Image (cartoon, rainbow, N blue to C red):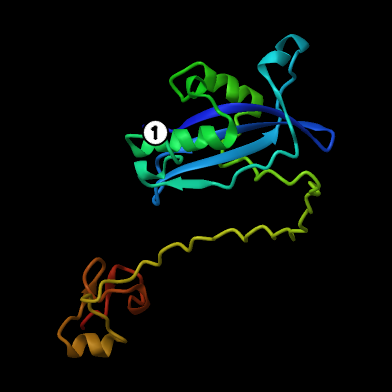
Amino acid sequence: MTPVEQYLGRVRRNGKWRIRWVRVDPYTASGILVSVHEVDLACEIKPAESAEHPELDPAWPLPDPMTIRSERDAPVGQVAGSAENAALLRAEQATGARRDRWVNTSVSGWSELNRLRGDAGPDEAAPFPPADADESVEELDVPEQDDPEPVVEEEPVEQEPADEAYYKNCTEARAAGAAPLRKGEPGYRSALDRDDDGEACETD
């Protein structure tokens, strides 16, 4: 069974038209969820279409969400045969929904329901307020965050190989038997090459 929904009608609340629908959703951890939703009407209804959009009593008590776990949860005196059918029977009993008007994503009625509610599904639809509820929403003062400082990547520093010879002075180089040191050879550095001829620590 895929989730199914049914448009129930429109209701005038605090000077605004809202639409109401019921949803039967089998994909919940606890069982099949039956829930009723209400949002502001997202489009204009023409007078010729009024018959297709019954006006509901705003004082009509809306049922709390119901969880159906098995066929035994069907209304008293009715044989469901399955948990899915029990959920449909309970939804129809509680809301006045009709068996021949359930829709899902595979039928044309689904797009019409989305048009009326502005594509707001049950996740986006706020719980319906009581008839005397205050629908004003308090705006929260959220402080602005400073822009994060840019991250500067440091260039890697070239390190001399650990096994390359190093001599503090020519005395060390001669004592190690490495003199003379020629450019390109381990241990050579320009500080030891006094005449800058490419050979350091020359022997007499």
Question: From this viewpoint, which residue is outermost toward the left?
Answer: 177
**109 relative to 54 in the view: left or right:** left
Could you tell me which quadrant the N terminus lies in? Answer: top left
Which residue is painted at 63% across and 60% down in the image? 148
Q: Quadrant of residue 170?
A: bottom left
- 69 vs 122, nearest the viewer: 69
Q: Is residue 192 above or below residue 7?
A: below
In depth, the one of 125 and 12 nearer the eye is 12
Residue 47, by quadrant, is: top right
Up the image or down, 48 lies above or below 25; here it is: above
| Dot 1: element | helix
Residue count near mark 1 (Cα–Cα under 10 Å), binned few <14, some 14–19, many ≥20: some
Residue 129: percent from the left, percent from the top? 72, 46
Split into 4 quadrants, where in the image is the C terminus?
A: bottom left
List the single residue furthest toward the right: 15
- Where does residue 105 sit, x and y in percent of width and height? 46, 24
| Residue sitting farthest toward the top | 48
Question: Label 1 is placed on what type of residue?
Answer: Asn
Left or right: 15 as drawn, with respect to 160:
right
Q: Residue at x 41, y 37 (%)?
A: 86
Residue 202 at x, y percent in the picture: 24, 79
* Residue ID for mark 1: 85
| Residue 97 on image: x %, y % | 55, 28
Query: In front: 152, or 131?
Result: 131
Residue shown at 54% from the left, 46% from the top = 65
